[in-house]
Image: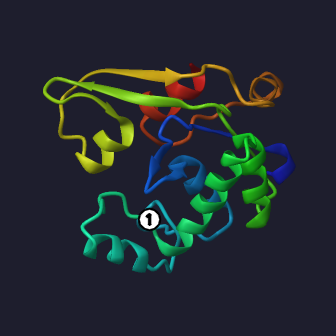
Amino acid sequence: LPESALTVIVNTGDDFRHWGLHVSPDLDTVMYTLSGLGHEARGWGLAEESFGALEMVKRYGGDDWFALGDRDLGTHLMRTEALGRSEALSAITARLFRGLGVTTRVLPMADAPCRTMIDTEADGTLPFQEWFVRRRTAPVVKRVWFDGTRTPAPGVVEAIEAADLCIGGPSKPYVSVVPILA
């Protein structure tokens, strides 16, 4: 398939702030995978990554439940800085992908936050990453809902309408595909 024939629309419901940085786990996984830099065995992050910053955070007693690698931090720093200048996530995403040589069109589902929230039986409402990574999906789920905008990023609706075929990528359908469709 020629790269120009493919548009990838990526869930941003998993996005969150960690260490003051805007982290977009699904966008980053797609970016690292398409650039050939992704860690295939782990399924997330960069291959040949180091975790020196994470080790220092641990030594200082900080939150170490979400493993950000040293080179991965560069991605989050650039995204956070650009968002702080009020740049749209879709524009930032295009620039980051180009920076890694990815020419496939990749769109975040929305420019504004639309966080996936998990209502649990015993622990109340948890943001998705708190439930999935920090709590390792242990709290029993009562409801999944989305907090934030339902406005698609520029080009998302047009890409779907123009598509000859839509494929839902392998993931957790209710928390990765449903946020896009919502």
Determine the residue positioned at 74% across, 49% down.
92
Asked if residue 167 is positioned above or below residue 63 in the image, the reply reads above
Asked if residue 100 is positioned above or below residue 109 in the image, the reply reads below
Q: In this view, does 115 lie to the left or right of 106?
A: left
Asked if residue 21 is positioned above or below residue 123 in the image, the reply reads below
**Which of the pair 64/102 is nearer the observer?**
64
Determine the residue positioned at 56% across, 19% down.
182
Q: How is the image coloured?
A: rainbow
Residue 18 visible here:
yes
Asked if residue 56 is positioned above or below residue 101 in the image, the reply reads below
- Measured as percent of width and height from the top left, residue 93 is found at 71, 49
- Quadrant of the image occupied by residue 102: bottom right
Determine the residue positioned at 82% across, 25% down.
158
- Measured as percent of width and height from the top left, residue 127 is found at 36, 35
Identified by mark 1, the residue type is Leu
**Which of the pair 101/154 is nearer the observer?**
154
Count every numbered label the image shows and give the total.
1
**Mark 1 surroundings: few (<14), some (14-19) or many (≥20) residues within 10 A:** many
Q: Is residue 164 left or right of residue 50?
A: right
- Measured as percent of width and height from the top left, residue 179 is found at 52, 27
- Measured as percent of width and height from the top left, residue 28 is found at 58, 55
Circle 1: element type:
loop
**Which of the pair 71/2 is nearer the observer?**
71
Residue 105 visible here:
no
Determine the residue positioned at 86% across, 48% down.
4
| Residue that label 1 marks | 68
- Quadrant of the image occupied by residue 106: top right
